């Protein structure tokens, strides 16, 4: 079953272009069907990845966290509870 992860980011205004460039240079992760990002506000973004399966996503999690470590300095805290990212994931239950 396909699986999807979605992550919300709040980027420091002075790093918006750097963040966008970093997105473009993400590694190609095994089992990742596609990824996209949208700008939802002046300095807020959401990115998603569509995966072949939860197992495929889980197998690449360490690599995704390593990539995230390279952009942490560009991010603002979303809230004390969430920290720098607001990630969610789950099985795809509908698609067109």
Image (tube, helix red, strand yellow):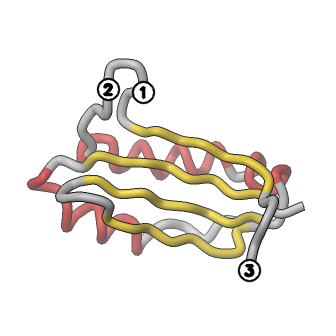
Please tell me which of labels 2 and 3 falls first in the chain: 2
- Residue carrying label 1: 82
Mark 1 falls on what kind of element?
loop
**Nearer mark to the viewer, of 2 and 3:** 3
| Residue occupied by mark 3 | 96
Residue 92 in the image: above or below residue 90: below
Q: What residue sits right under mark 2 in the picture? A: 79
Badge 2 element: loop
| Label 3 crowd bin: few (<14), some (14–19), many (20+), radius 10 Å | few
Characterize the local packing of mark 2: few (<14), some (14-19) or many (20 or more) Cα atoms within 10 angstroms: few
Q: CA distance from mark 1 to mark 2?
A: 5 Å
Q: Residue at x 21, y 55 (%)?
A: 43
Q: What x and y, as percent, mark residue 11? A: 24, 49
Q: Which mark is residue 14?
A: none
> Mark 2 and mark 1 in contact (Cβ < 8 Å)?
yes
Q: Quadrant of the N terminus?
A: bottom right
| Left or right, 94 with reference to 42 | right
């Amino acid at each position: 079953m396909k699986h999807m992860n979605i992550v919300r980011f709040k980027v420091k205004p002075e790093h918006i272009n750097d963040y966008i460039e970093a997105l473009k240079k993400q590694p190609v992760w095994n089992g990742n069907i596609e990824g996209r990002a949208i700008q939802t506000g002046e300095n807020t973004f959401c990115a998603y990845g569509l995966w072949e399966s939860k197992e495929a996503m889980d197998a690449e999690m360490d690599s995704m966290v390593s990539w995230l470590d390279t952009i942490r300095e560009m991010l603002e805290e979303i809230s004390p509870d969430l920290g720098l990212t607001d990630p969610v994931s789950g099985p795809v239950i509908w698609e067109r």
